[in-house]
Every structure is written in structure tokens, then in C-alpha cells.
């Protein structure tokens, strides 16, 4: 019953749009490889280098926090026999607090919407805009109706190199493919 309604809806839309009365026009499709384009763009290397430097700096800070926690545990173990129960509990509480601080730091920097993600988004956005604008111009110039991204996942089973417009996008961006 539901299938019949869907078919009737589709038929009424087709008839309502007058597709049957218009001559069929071939629609052009193509694809690009966004990874290929990104890796060829000189700004991408600069973005990657900056992100790597930031990431290494933040990882070092996270490792320093972890090392401080390990040292606190080692000191506690070494002085355990000399501490009163109250002093021992204070040290354990301090260690637990430092562990919470380390977890909060990792979440703040490397979490889902952390500083690393935000910085990556901030640095890549202008580059993605340039590439999108070039893609838009290539599609309009070549009268493409649909342009797929080969790098976006396993959406394409076969690709004919004749329909690869990655080179045109690189050319539009002024990048020479070596």
C-alpha cells in the first residue's frame, strides 16, 4: 500500500513538472579527488605544518601532566611509610585532582570540539573556500550537473578517467600538476 502511494506521488510529480513533454537532455557528471587537490595545493602543506607544530606542543603539555602524575605516585610510594593516614589521603586527593586536570586538558585540547579541531577548521576554511569556488567555476564552465568526490568514501565503484575534473580544478586554482 505504501509503495503504491510513493509510486503515485513520483508519477504525479513527474507529470506536474512536465518532464514528459520536454525533450530529454543529457546530464553531465564528473568527479574530482579532493585529497589529490588538497595535497597539490601549496597552502595545504603550510596548514599541515602549523597543525603539526601545535599538536606537538599540546601533546608535550599533556605528556608533562602525565609525567607529573607519575612522579606524584612515585613520591607517594617512596614516602608512604613516613606519612600519617591524613597526610596520605591529602596526597592521594592531590594526585586525583591532577589526574582530573590532565583529563580536562586532553578533552579541552583534543576533544570533539577541542582547540585542535577548532584550529584545524579555522586554518582549512579559507583553503576549502578557494577550492569550492574553483570547483563551482569548473562545473559551470563544463556544464556539469553533478560532481562527485572520489575521496569522500566508497560511493563510486568505477571511475572513468575521462570524467576526472581534478586537473581542471587545479588549473583553476593556478596550481601546476607536476
Image (cartoon, rainbow, N blue to C red):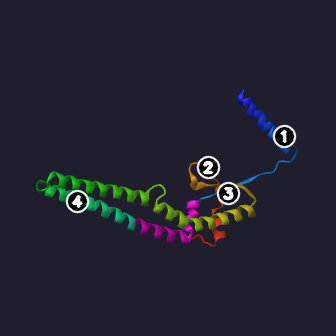
Q: In this view, does 24 lie to the left or right of 161?
A: right
Q: In this view, does 116 lie above or below 157?
A: below
Q: Name the residue under label 3.
A: 163
Q: Residue at (50%, 62%) from the top-left corner? A: 118
**Farthest residue, direction top:** 1
Q: Name the residue under label 4.
A: 72
* Magenta range: 34-56
Per the model, the C-alpha gap separating discs 4 and 2 is: 58 Å
Q: In this view, does 135 lie above or below 18?
A: below
Per the model, the C-alpha gap separating discs 2 and 3 is: 11 Å
Crowdedness of circle 1 by 10 Å Cα count: few (<14), some, many (20+)?
few
Tell me whether circle 4 and circle 2 mark residues in contact (CB < 8 Å): no
Nearest-to-viewer mark from 4 and 1: 4
Quarter of the picture containing the N terminus is: top right
Q: Return the disc, 1 or 3, that comes first in the chain's sequence.
A: 1
Where disc 3 sits, the SS reads: helix
Per the model, the C-alpha gap separating discs 1 and 2 is: 33 Å
Amino acid at each position: 500500500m505504501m509503495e503504491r502511494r510513493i509510486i503515485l506521488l513520483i508519477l504525479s510529480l513527474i507529470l506536474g513538472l512536465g518532464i514528459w513533454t520536454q525533450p530529454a537532455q543529457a546530464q553531465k557528471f564528473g568527479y574530482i579527488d579532493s585529497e589529490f587537490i588538497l595535497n597539490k595545493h601549496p597552502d595545504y602543506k603550510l596548514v599541515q605544518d602549523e597543525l603539526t607544530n601545535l599538536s606537538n606542543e599540546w601533546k608535550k603539555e599533556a605528556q608533562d601532566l602525565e609525567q607529573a602524575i607519575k612522579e606524584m605516585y612515585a613520591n607517594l610510594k617512596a614516602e608512604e611509610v613516613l606519612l600519617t593516614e591524613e597526610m596520605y589521603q591529602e596526597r592521594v586527593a592531590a594526585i586525583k585532582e591532577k589526574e582530573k586536570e590532565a583529563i580536562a586538558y586532553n578533552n579541552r585540547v583534543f576533544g570533539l570540539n577541542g582547540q585542535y579541531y577548532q584550529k584545524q577548521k579555522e586554518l582549512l576554511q579559507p583553503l576549502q573556500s578557494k577550492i569550492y569556488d574553483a570547483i563551482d567555476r569548473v562545473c559551470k564552465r563544463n556544464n556539469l550537473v553533478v560532481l562527485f568526490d572520489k575521496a569522500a568514501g566508497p560511493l563510486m565503484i568505477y571511475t572513468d578517467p575521462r570524467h576526472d575534473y581534478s586537473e581542471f580544478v587545479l588549473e583553476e586554482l593556478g596550481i601546476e600538476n607536476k
